[in-house]
Image (cartoon, grey):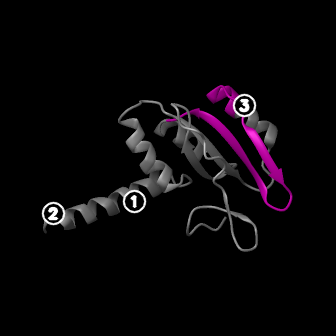
Amino acid sequence: MDCTDDIKNRFREFENAMEVCLPKVDKNLIVELLGDLKEDDYPGYNLQIKLREGFDEENFRESILHDLGVLPGFHKDEKYGGHAAVEHRVNFKTLSYLSNMDDVEFIHGSRAGGGRASIGPRLERDENDKIYGPPGSKA
């Protein structure tokens, strides 16, 4: 096995670890966070959290406030469902906490603070104008 085969194998292992450890988190967010964690142990991110249909807004709000100390902003629509926006300092423990919440379907995010402007919500819509998750998801 040459060096490039080793890279391919390790990348497959990394992809598998992302899927197992943080199944609801956008893979691009994980990769971006890895780079940011080299410079900052707890970088600020604007997280967009897609919530399951029928989620309990009050319960979700109270959990985030209690555990993270911030109030999420909610965007709810009968046609598209709901999602929450949370601006907070993030590490893998934070993403794991959010990913393990029953009401969460998936998480996208972009770096915020430190002279960086948020690029705003990154939830995408398909041809039927419905919010969807990461490629291959059923959301």
Q: CA distance from mark 3 to mark 2?
A: 47 Å
Residue under label 2, please give it. Answer: 3
Spot occupied by residue 10 in the image (x, y as percentages of width and height): 28, 59
Q: CA distance from mark 3 to mark 1?
A: 32 Å
Taking 43 as reference, is 70 left or right?
Answer: right
Which residue occupies the foreground of this view, 88 or 103?
A: 88
Residue under label 1, please give it. Answer: 15
Callout 3–callout 1 Cβ contact below 8 Å? no
What crowding class fits label 1: few (fewer than 14 Cα within 10 Å), some (14-19), or many (20 or more)? few
Given the image, on which type of amino acid does mark 1 rest?
A: Glu
Residue under label 3, please give it. Answer: 71
Disc nearer the start of the sequence (2/1): 2
Query: Which residues lie in the magenta part?
Result: 64-90
Spot occupied by residue 48 in the image (x, y as percentages of width and height): 65, 47
Q: Quadrant of residue 68?
A: top right
Residue at 69% x, 70% y is 126
Disc nearer the start of the sequence (3/2): 2
Say if 76 sits above or below 5 in the image: above
Query: For numbered disc 3, what is the local secondary structure?
Result: loop
Callout 3–callout 2 Cβ contact below 8 Å? no
Spot occupied by residue 117 in the image (x, y as percentages of width and height): 58, 39
Which residue occupies the foreground of this view, 73 or 120?
A: 120
Disc nearer the start of the sequence (3/1): 1
Taking 123 as reference, is 6 left or right?
Answer: left
Most distant residue in the left direction: 2
Residue at 42% x, 30% y is 41
Query: For numbered disc 1, what is the local secondary structure?
Result: helix
User: Does the stretch in magenta take in 38?
Assistant: no
Give residue 103's mark: none
